[in-house]
Amino acid sequence: MRRPKKYESGEATQYISRRAALRKLQLSLNDFRRLCILKGVYPREPKHRRRAQKGSSEIKVLYHSKDIRFLLHEPIVWTLRDYKIFAKKTGRDRAIKDFRNLKRRLALFPEIKLDHIVKERYPTFIDALKDLDDCLTLMFLFSTFPSLHLIPREQSNLCRRLTIEFLHYIIASKSLRKVFISIKGYYFQAEIKGQKVNWIVPHYYPFKPQSRQEVDFKVMSIFVEFFTIMLGFTNFRLFHGLNMAYPPQFPSNMLQDSEDTFKDESSFVSDRIAALNFELLRTDKVQEDEEDIDIDIDMDLLEQDGDSKRIIKMKQEAQETARLRTLFKGLKFYINREVPREPLVIIIRSFGGKVSWDSSVFAGATFDENDETITHQIVDRPSVSTQYISRDYIQPQWLFDCVNQRQLLPTNKYFMGESLPPHLSPFVDAKRDTYIPPEEKALHDPSLIETHAQSDDESEDEAAAEEDDVDQEALDAQLQLAYQQETAEYKKYGDADGVNEDEEDTDEYLEEEQSEEGSEEEEEEEEVDEKTKRLQAEKEKMSVQSGKVHKVNKRQLHKAEVDEHRLQARMVKPRHRDLFRKLIREKQSKEKEQWLLKKKRRNIEADAKEAKKQAKRDARKAAAAAAQAAAQLTK
Amino acid sequence: MAAAASIAVKRKRISKKNKSAWRKTDIQDVEQFLEHQRQEERIGTFEEKQDADLFTIDASPLKAPPSLLSIKQKRKLNAKKPMRTHLALENTSKVQDPIVSRNHVKQKQNGRNIEQEVRNPTKPRHRQANSDRASYYEKMEKRATDKQSGKRVNNMEKDIWIEEDFRDKIPGLKDEKGWISRNLALHIAGNVGKKLVKTHASLHHKTTKAKKFEPPHPGMSYNPTLRAHQELIDTVVDRETGIIKKEQHLKRVTTSMFSKVTPEERDKRRLMEMSEGMPDAEQEQEAAGEEADETEAKPTDNAYTTINAPVENKKKSKQARSKELKQKELERLHQVKKALKKQTADLNRIKSIRAELNEEAEELNELKKRRKQTVERKKFEPKRLGRHKFEEPDLDVNMPEDLAGNLRNVKVESNLLTDRFKLLQKRNMLPTTVAVTRKKSKVKRYPRNSHKEAGTSYQDLRDQRKAAAAAAKANKDTIKI
């Protein structure tokens, strides 16, 4: 048997250097780069570089040899080779000034066909959606570019078209979930078919030239070349999922015969499409309300399955999103000219609001500023000369905060010229189990603000008395809350009618219960006469006594908790014991940290309060002294 | 002033004191007049002449009008003319060719006459070429019409994710009875020309476990909470101090490790180092003195001498060898004895040995654990794909004074394109590269002479100077009144 030579098997054959790959594919480096990006073949890092590089220890760019073998089958390799021929031939024609031939050749420019690659890289539609983040961010960025060296104008125009189409889908499907204004740009998060898709839209400012030192424009352009095709197919599928016509069209009644439409219909239509302010043509006649009903039915089906915590959580989430989808329903917004139009239009329209703007800013405005039915006007300047009483003048952040907190916030903090409350990131969980300062808590739950504000300015003597009151109030509120929760839970499991949140309903419910009991008694009246007598006797004895606050035995509670924890610990399988311990330790450390920070805060606040009191006391003393002095003087 | 001017216009009066000074009188006009009179007397006056004597009829041919052809057209016309070099070869003789019929020698053609082949194809390959050409033109026409009607090569208006069977596309492969197996169908598809390419799992292999979407730090909000913003700034500061520390460390370890000297000292040291071993000037003198002494002692000794003593091959005696062997044996026995003694002693300290072993095992375990941790950590880190290592880009942060608090005055800090580019590198999709810029050689440029500004050149200055001197001289000559 032949003795195997070195580097004939194992890692050395698993990898192939870039230079070898070029030789194998018969392509130039530029073409190879392009091919790799389009096909999604990326360089690899071997486990043992020296073995993979056949003994050489310098760091080379390596590829998986299977990947390169896979590239050999690719039909676009031939197109890339054709490019070379094309460049040579056209160059010759140009040199000898044979323009007839040149024209003929240019008409036959070999274009790369990419649709099979999209299918290959993303076998299912969900795969494509999962990988949409980068695609969208780059496309939104490129749609702002002018024609640059290595980035043709058609590419940026195509990017613009496709992103607008995508935004139309987002608006029509109402799938926007989170929005955030950062110093980078606007972050958006949408939920499409259960996938969370994030993208960043740059701030609307003039184009800033980019130095070529940092970014390889050619590479980015190739990425975008692939992404445009990918987003095109994705858009098609998304639009058809919603029964909308693709490419987007307007219903025919939208196109009234005016001068503008006659002049240039295509540009008129594309302007209106870019305005994002009109419903698009649908291939069916499904109304929005019906869709909502569908979702409700789904949730009902879920309910029968069981009542595990997960399903309850899912149901809550579904309710929340349903509420979110109609957040701005019935509201009418007007965007002032200094406010960036596009992000706000997306937000308002995808939550059911109506929106318009100054018709000189962009095409597609539906109503004027002097419309009396406008409920909110979004301004970003300290003052406006003419104001209408019927509407709120608010700053754009209100919309973003409303969406993130999934409720309409009071507008008073966002009025024109007001200094805004901080804009929190929705990507940070508000219910995380670390220390959250009370200010931030208040931002998430506005009910906490009032109590905090009230307790601030109180006189020295009243403070102590009122503290008790506050405690009492808080306790009452807590009890009430607990009661509400209880009833809600009861309803969830016991009652199949559905969920009503108002308190009145709960009262009714109780009454019903009582009446039911009464009816039962009537039926068994004869049999239990003695009993009724006894009951009546007891009833006479009955009296109303002052209630006692239920005292919680903290010790017992703690003991129960500890016991439960011990049981839990015993239930843990031996192989998970380490993990369990780790989790416990983490939890403990977190709790400790939280406690420490809280204590720190309490100390600081107490000090501040003490200082304030001291100051007040001093002031009072000084006043008294002054009064005495004055009295003495008058004497 | 006006009077002075009129004086200047008047002829200058020159003194004519002597007879020789009379020549200065200007009598040109008088002489001209006299000359004219004499000529009239000779040939008669203008009025007396006949018309025929004065004028003649122009019999010369008319000049050709200027041609309306452009230079390009002229050039084309000229190209049609026979070449001037061939003019000499032309037969201008009027004598007729005595041989009536000549055998014309067929000129050997250079290459094929394609025009001829197209017009009347004689061979099958000509016909093939003609049909190929026709199909090519057809294809081109189709492409051109497609392009005009706005049809794209990458037509995005179809659903590519529809589940479909490749057998539907090839007629005859779809069978209800199950006679054609899938493998057979695959084989046929390959041979028909619609080959199915299988994608292998390695293509969808994820090289990093890091999350695709990194949520922005809450401090990056355009209007952040104080705490979040402070946190972000703290992280930025931490990172920056780390970099500074590293730099300082490197400086301390490299640059400042070496003592510094002045350039003169350095040169002197270099000279010393380079001339090491060469006879010094002073030493040379001393050496010369010694040599003089030596020459006195051994005037004719030129033999080579070494400093080291000569190596001697000393043999050991038999006795010494046996002694050595005995010594070695003794040593070995001693060692064995010692080991035995240790073994017996170790029996007593089994417990401590066990502890030692345990300790060792624990250390090994620790090492294993750490290695596993690093492997796990590396799964989330960007891989080393090329010559350059990936470096995390700087965090984007607004300084406290830049926070405007409203959307109108947001100071944009980041560059999204760079951000994406770095993200692609981080996700192992691009090897980290450093842009290389070739330094262009500096070209020294001069303005053309014709583009120079007037009056700035030395030549012009010289001319000006000359003119000024001439004027001064002229002024000197003239007499000022």
Image (spheres, rainbow, N blue to C red):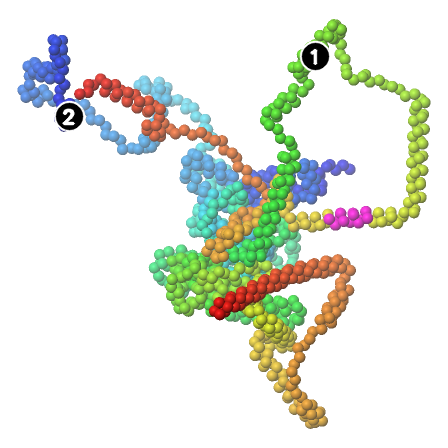
- The region drawn magenta spans B359-370
Which circle marks residue B287 in the picture?
1
Task: Examine the residues drawn in magenta and state their main secondary structure.
Answer: helix
- Residue at point 11% right, 22% down? B55
Is label 1 in a helix, a strand or a loop? helix
The residues tagged by marks 1 and 2 sit, at their Cα atoms, a distance apart of 101 Å
Which of marks 2 and 1 precedes in the sequence?
Answer: 2
The spot of residue B307 in percent (x, y) is 77, 16
Taking depth in this image into account, of A326 and A552 the one nearest to the observer is A552
Which circle marks residue A517 in the picture?
none
Magenta span contains residue B365 = yes
- Identify the image quadrant of residue B169: bottom right
Magenta span contains residue A71 = no
- Is residue B233 in sight in this rendering? yes
- Residue at point 63% right, 34% down? B255
The amino acid sitting under disc 2 is: Ala
Q: Please state, as top left, top right, bottom left or bottom right, where the N terminus of chain A lies in the image.
A: top right
Taking depth in this image into account, of A629 and A175 the one nearest to the observer is A629
Taking depth in this image into account, of A488 and A345 the one nearest to the observer is A488
The amino acid sitting under disc 1 is: Ala
Give the chain letter at badge 1: B
Is label 2 in a helix, a strand or a loop? helix
Left or right of B297, for residue B172:
left
Task: Sort mark 1 into few (<14), some (14-19) or many (20+) by Cα contacts within 10 Å.
Answer: some
- Residue at point 65% right, 55% down? B181
The spot of residue B62 in percent (x, y) is 20, 26
Give the chain letter at badge 2: B
Label 1–label 2 contact, CB within 8 A? no
Instruction: Give the residue pinned by disc 2.
Output: B5
Task: Sort mark 2 into few (<14), some (14-19) or many (20+) by Cα contacts within 10 Å.
Answer: few
